[in-house]
Image (cartoon, coloured by chain):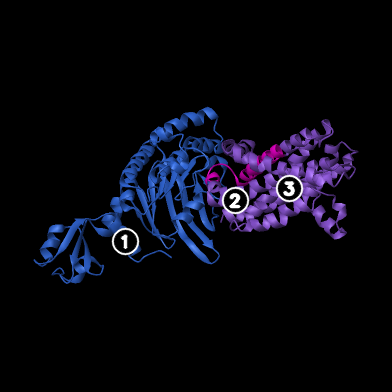
Amino acid sequence: MENSSVITATNLVKKYGDLEVVRDIDFSVPTGQCFGLLGPNGAGKSTTMRMIMGLSEVTGGTLTVFGKPASGMARDIKAKIGLVPQESNLDPDITVLENLYAFGRYFALPKDVIEERSKKLLEFMQLSDKQHAPVNALSGGMKRRLTIARALIGDPEMVILDEPTTGLDPQARVLIWKQLLELKKDGRTLLLTTHYMDEAQRLCDQIVIIDGGKILDHGTPEELISRRVKGFVFEVQKPHAPGSSADRWDQEDIGDSVLYFVEDTAEFIADLPEDAIYLHRPANLEDVFLRLTGRQLREN
Amino acid sequence: MKMPELPYIHAVYDRQYRVFRKLLGSALVSNVANPILFLFAFGFGMGSFIDTMAGMSYMTFVVAGMVGYSAAFAASFETSIGAFTRYFLQKNWDAILSTPVTLAELMMGEVLWASVKALFSAICVLIVGWMWGGVPVIFEPLITLPIVFLGSICFACAGLVATAYAKGYEFFAYFFTFWVTPMFVFCGVFFEISRFPDAVQYIAWFFPMTHLIAAIRPLIAGTAIDPALIALHTAYIVIFSAAAFAIAHRKLRQRLYD
């Protein structure tokens, strides 16, 4: 279904010299959905995003964006994409409003269109009273909101967000989530990377989990949870363990305790010794992520 | 490569212009007051020892040199330290390259703005020189303006080469020591390059500054001009600009895309 996909990657490969950072991945981003690209640091997310933006050359396979090869990066395609980068690259020499104005010019929009959209976008991102403030006077959350507003100045069909809420306070995150869902209601396609699984679970219709340049799993958040971690998680402190044989329950040893992923809670509780100490909660995407990508630290 | 289109080049230019308007005070100081100080020191100071040089008053000689140098300094600064700050520190170029603007258009916008700013400071020097009696004629100096503009484009392109290769701000010490300063002292700003040994003269003619000053000085002084020679100097400047732009584009492409 080529037509209903904004991005289609087929056998996509990216190598830097001998180092293969994206290894033969396939995915497609359906029009009008929020698509999450999740993975630990160094998984190949940013490289994939750079390839989609035409900033990084495709080594192998194909990558099409709005039906055209990403590497050619036709101007009319770039005009349909708004990018919210991870690091703020707002223009610090000019004001909030001027940032939107300058960006509108980069999209070759007429002056009156820029002015009209800027006003709406500042309202949308709740920055209207800051419009004449210099960028450096904004808080981290305001800067991120302005970056999102800036990405929308070209009225993009797709918005790419690279960790849009990292480092923000809960209030700012909630506002951004709400507005991102609004964008989706308008029919825009969202491509999101995040380290927050609650964020992915809340926003994304489809999720791809990648690590080491490969896709580990793909599906809706609900599918991933039921496939990988059943419905509930029991964290049982050692040395207690269920009475049945070890392979009856899907489990993972995490040191001082063991995690059990179960569908039927009553059955599992019945199998536990009476004095067992345990925590019990519904399984979530974080459990999926950690099961798939492991618990080792990924920095360096 | 996509053909560069004017609206996108102008968008980059326009951003620079807006910032310039805000920082007009410091921009005026560095681009106008600075060359004027030199003009006074050399025109009056040295001028009291030297009556004429190259068949014109020393004041006139220095005005012509400072017109060229003020353009060179303004354009070089804007596309080296100025552009590097936008590229490296502010990540402004990353932001721009995520829009429909291409790298070539971004660079052209930077060059265009740097050249307009350079022309502006050259005009200020010309006006001040004229007020102090260093410009004896009115019409001919106006012909220098397009040539100064082309020269500024050339200096701006050379500045972009430095930005393209710079790994940090330290790199610009080389750029200023081995490129900007030689243009100040070896290219005929304060005295004729014919005073140098031949070897130094050859080196001097490599610098577009020498060609710019050689082209504009007779026009500012109102002395006899050789249109063919002016065309030749201008051609050198244009070819140098194109080469520098191509080198900078190639290197920046490697750095900004992977």
**Residue at 35% in and 66% down:** A296
Magenta stretch: includes residue A236: no
Q: Secondary structure at mark 3?
A: helix
**Is residue A213 found left or right of B195 in the rendered image?**
left
The quarter holding residue A18 reads bottom right
Q: How many marks?
A: 3
Q: Nearer the viewer, mark 3 or mark 1?
A: 3
Q: Reading the chain from its start, which is encountered first: label 3 or label 2?
A: 2
Q: Are marks 3 and 1 in contact (CB under 8 Å)?
A: no
Q: Main secondary structure of the magenta part?
A: helix
Density class for disc 2 (Cα within 10 Å; few <14, some 14-19, many ≥20) is many
Identify the chain of the residue marked 1, using the numbered disc in the image.
A
Q: Secondary structure at mark 1?
A: helix
Report how far apart the C-alphas of labels 3 and 2 lie in the structure: 19 Å
Chain B: its colour in the image is: purple
Write down the residue under mark 1.
A290
Chain A: its colour in the image is: blue
Camera-side residue of A202 and A206: A202
Quadrant of the drawing holding the N terminus of chain A: top left
Write down the residue under mark 2.
B84
Write down the residue under mark 3.
B241
Camera-side residue of A133 and A120: A133
Q: Amino acid at mark 3?
A: Ser
Report how far apart the C-alphas of labels 2 and 1 lie in the structure: 41 Å
Q: Amino acid at mark 1?
A: Leu
Identify the chain of the residue marked 3, using the numbered disc in the image.
B
Density class for disc 3 (Cα within 10 Å; few <14, some 14-19, many ≥20) is many
Q: Which residues are magenta?
A: B95-121
**Is residue A225 found left or right of A23 in the rendered image?**
left
